[in-house]
Amino acid sequence: MMIKDNILLERFEKDLKIREKADYFKNLKIFEEMFKEAVYLNAFPLKDPLEGIEVDIKIAKVINNV
């Protein structure tokens, strides 16, 4: 289902930010677990960090020109 009422969504996001303050240690734990999973799935570290950089540069150019 797609959200069609942008104003309602923005109000919801604003209220959520007010109600739920960021928890540094909780977020750090989530990050650490995601990192462990990426390593477990052999998605990280990258074998060649620059692989596909040309595509990323083209996408960045298009986005920056919009």
Image (cartoon, grey):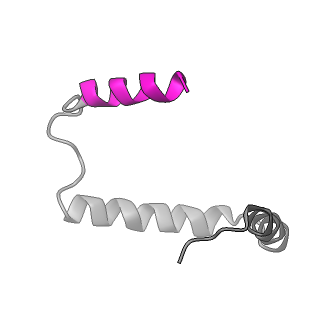
Locate the C terminus by quadrant: top right
- Residue placed at 34% from the left, 24% from the top? 58
Q: Is residue 41 magenta?
A: no
**Quarter of the image holding residue 38?**
bottom left
**Quarter of the image holding residue 47?**
top left
Percent coordinates x, y for residue 48 in the rendering: 16, 34
Residue 18 vs 62, above or below: the answer is below
Viewer-nearest residue: 4 or 63: 4
Magenta-highlighted residues: 53-66
Percent coordinates x, y for residue 18 in the rendering: 85, 67
Q: Is residue 48 left or right of residue 23?
A: left
Residue 33 vs 61, above or below: the answer is below
Q: Is residue 47 left or right of residue 28?
A: left
- Residue placed at 80% from the left, 63% from the top? 7
Magenta stretch, overall SS: helix
Q: What residue occupies the far bottom of the structure in this picture?
A: 1
Q: Is residue 59 magenta?
A: yes
